[in-house]
Image (cartoon, rainbow, N blue to C red):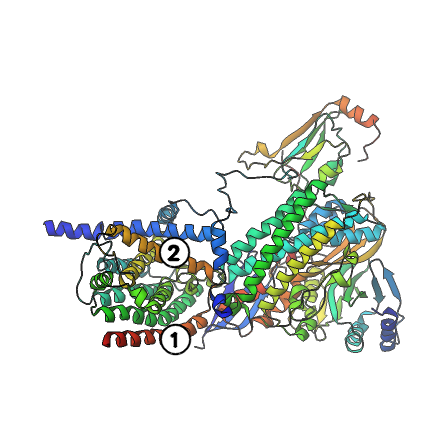
Amino acid sequence: MADLLVALAKLLLFPGFAFLFACAMLFAWIDRLVIARLQGRVGPPWFQPLADWIKLMAKEDILPTGTNGWVCAALPVLSLAAVLTASIYIPVGGWIAHAFEGDLIVVLFLLSLPPLAYFLGGWATGGVYSVIGGNRSLLQYFSYEVPFLMALCSPAILSGSWSIAEIAARQSETIWGALVQPLGFILALVGLIGKLKRAPFDIPKAKSEIVAGPLTEFSGRKLALWHLSIEVKTVVGIFLLVNAFLGGSGVSGLLPAPITFAIKSLLVLLILSVASVLYARLRIDQLANLGWRVLAPLALLQIAATVWIGAT
Amino acid sequence: MLRLRSIVYLLPDLVRTLFTRRSTVRYPFGPLELPPYFRGRVVVDAELCRGCGACVRDCPSTGLRLRHDGHGGFRLLHYPDRCANCGQCEASCRTGAIRLVGAYVAPTHAREELVETLVKGSGELKKRGTSQAHPST
Amino acid sequence: MSTRITIPIGPQHPLLKEPLSFMITVEGERVVDSALRLGYVHRGIERLCQTKTYVQNLHLFERVCGICSHVHTTAYCQGVEALLGLEVPLRGLYLRTLLCELERVHSHLLWLGVLGENIGFQTIFMYAWRDREIALDIMEELSGGRVTHSGNVIGGVRIDVGDAQFSSIVSRLNDLEQRVEKLLGVIQHERTLRVRTQGIGYLSPEEIRRYCVVGPVARASGVDVDLRRDCKYAAYGRLHVNVALAHEGDVWARTLVRAREAIESLRLCRQLLVGLPEGPTRVRAPRRVPPGEVVSRAEAPRGELLYYIRSDGSDKPARVKIRTPTLTSLITVHDQLEGVETADVSVVLSGIDLCIACVDR
Amino acid sequence: MNIPRILELLQEVLPAARLEVQTVPIDEHFISLPPDNLHAAVRALLERSDVYHLSTITGQDLDGQIELLYHFWQGGGLTLRTGLPRDRARIETITDLIPGASFYEREIAEMLGVTFLGHPDPQPLFLPEDWEGDPPLRREFALPEEREEGE
């Protein structure tokens, strides 16, 4: 009975839904505020993401005729469920909910589900913009996923373990992965931006070209769930990077583990925010070029270097 | 080097912007500055208005009307919803009675507020106006 | 993939700030055909103006366009003044030109912002519109309105620059010039912006001539036309205008031309303020206009603006024809769109600086 | 713009017509032509002079005729004026010479009911497809009454 309660608490409160929801809202606000300040604007008040979300939840839910309502409702839930499940295996602030050898692979697999749901969401609603956005999101998926995976392989190879908690612990004892493998860190960041469909890789939802991409026809609660799943994915992705490259919650004793972890996460978020105001949106073929001609060879090089370092 | 700079070209500007004054305000919670010559609400100096109708004649958006009561008295009506705030009435007025002042016209739900009586002139005023030799409408 | 999809762009679309309809047929990501439909903001101004007096029409024509409002009244006043045979005082001409140039700065910066927004470059959008505020503030201070200035009257202008304003305006113009220089630097050097705009929407000088395109779009293809220099209306005869030219003919070149033009306009503004002659700003104009016809041209921010005015001797015009510059560039869109990626449609459309209210009238 | 030279050129191309130049303010020169000769005149301008820029075509409904004004510009204004009968308003298109005239001709076609013979795409441009009634710039077209204020 007590086990069940603990499991439920883990799932619903920490590090599960409630915590991630709060983090998602906080990160969304910080992101918007930083972008606003960099562009010389005042920016939104702290409750704006929450208010937006509640507003969306309260809105009327409309779907085009001829679409399957169940599929359209299931897809955002699937997307959200995948990222929430992934979050269980990611240590947060020194707290490890679950860990086993190979959970990095599971997390990466779970994180690659939302793009598929996103693509299917475009096809399920069937508008012109949605379908084009769906196709683009799939093309983009192929461009960033390979470099992203390869970039995340190198810390695992270096620390000799495929468990995220283990990698983080090893790094905090020795040296951060980002310092040994700066190239891998940058590649992982670029991959993460592509994964999160943030500017400058917001190609599948490019407003001025295809309105809102696959989400064009969604509204109300379903759209709110989509937004939430994307925002939670941002949080999970950042946590993953902090663990894999920045030594997780750090050496115990210096600073309390949650604070170290929070600072590192905000640092990664800041990098993402700055990147999104620094560039114009690329075209899909330009992104594919970048992914396959630049990022993938660099990632290979990175792995080769890691293996070589490990061998010597 | 230039190639590398072109990848993060905007970064120095972004950092500079971070430490300069914000260019937006928290409207409607913050103050909004209006310049001294802002063409806003239409006001009329009742002392000066002679009811000649030059403003009504030149108004491009039929935002002004002159109503005569048949005994020399008149009312100058203004329709804020039609007004384009162009300032032509101010330019056309020969006595300098009309001015556009720096104030917004607030939106309204009330139908009555869509008509504004700017001036209610009596017959005497009208006579004084004609004696000074002008209206031509 | 060879299935063809028709993507509607407009009448309502995030890309378009005003309604207009493009039906774009794509094969995969490549555009193969496009069809244009106008008239969603057609207000019948050419007919409406026949029922209003010359004075009232001043404000009607100011509202043809929401961006280049002043140059419309400039072309109109110029025509009516020519019909009346009025000689506008020099100070009035200078101030009229000053507003024209400030308006050009504001229009080009607005356009740069729209381009930034359309290629997903939010920061350029924010910076350009932040800096444009300076030009708008100056115009608002001078005339009382941000975009509809009501600055022109038949026979001169209604605005004036006092000694107190003079130095403040000049210092703000200098500040603005530095900011526009900075934006020009971004256009010239920023990688992603160049990648997105270079080689897109190419028009050769021959195409420009065949389609009779005017303004910055023509100048970006190396066709050297600028009515400010060639026609010498208003006070331009007393100024030296350096015409910004580029030869690449793509959207990037248009961006460059417009940014350079904005800098040149700021230079002209300072020149106008420093050389502002003393004297009255306007002369009184009669209400009735003698019969006759006149063709009045002016260089709007988007190119040659033409007003044909015919008077039958009454206080209302018998016919006013307005040809706005955007109409000329819209003709070329079909050619420019052929073979571009779907993602570049927004770039091509922003490249010609759409002003649909102008086009529809 | 060398107006005497252009007049000479047009007179040479159109020996049957009697051409005159009428100069109006702001450096604009009007030359009247019969409608049948317009195409030939534009061709001559394009091929044998340096004029290439057609600013616009103005159409207007005057007493007894629809008047078309072809405004050219080359360092100065040149306008070719031609009149069409109101009940049979037809003229040959010049889009084969100047593709840029396409939109101007379409606008005049719908606004004044002029038929441009040989226009490649004679669809409405501004007016809705289901527009009924007279062309809006014709005199027959009645403007709706200006709304009176409801007090």
Q: Are marks 2 and 1 on the same chain?
A: yes
Please state the horizontal and vertical placement of residue C256, each as a whole percent of the image: 61, 65
Query: Residue lying furthest top in this view?
Result: B124
The reply, left or right, for residue D111 in relation to residue B134 is left
The CA distance from mark 2 to mark 1 is 26 Å
Which is nearer the eye, A204 or A134?
A: A204
**Picture disc at residue A292:** 1
Can the viewer see residue C181 in this picture? yes
Closer to the camera, B43 or C184?
Answer: C184
Read off the residue under disc 2.
Answer: A270
Residue in front for this viewpoint, C171 or A194: C171
Secondary element at tag 2: helix
- Residue D103 is left or right of residue B113, and the answer is right
Q: Could you say where residue A16 lies in the image, as x and y percent from the top left? A: 23, 53
Output the chain of dot 2.
A
- Circle 2 or circle 1, nearest the eye: 2
The tag earlier along the polypeptide, 2 or 1, is 2
Residue C258 x/y as whole percent: 63, 62
In the displayed structure, C81 sits above or below A187; it is above
Q: Amino acid at mark 1?
A: Trp
**How busy is the neighbourhood of tag 2: few (under 14 within 10 Å), some, or many (20 plus)?**
some
Letter of the chain that mark 1 sits on in the rendering = A
Image-based side of A169 in relation to B95, left or right:
left
What kind of element bears circle 1? helix
Q: What's the mark number on residue A140?
A: none
Kindly identify the amino acid type of the residue bearing the numbered disc 2: Leu
Considering every residue shown, the one lying at the far left of the view is A1
A20 w.r.t. A308: above or below: above
Mark 1 nearby-residue class (10 Å; few <14, some 14–19, many ≥20): some
- The residue at 22%/51% (across/down) is A14
Query: For residue C230, what is the image quadrant?
Result: bottom right
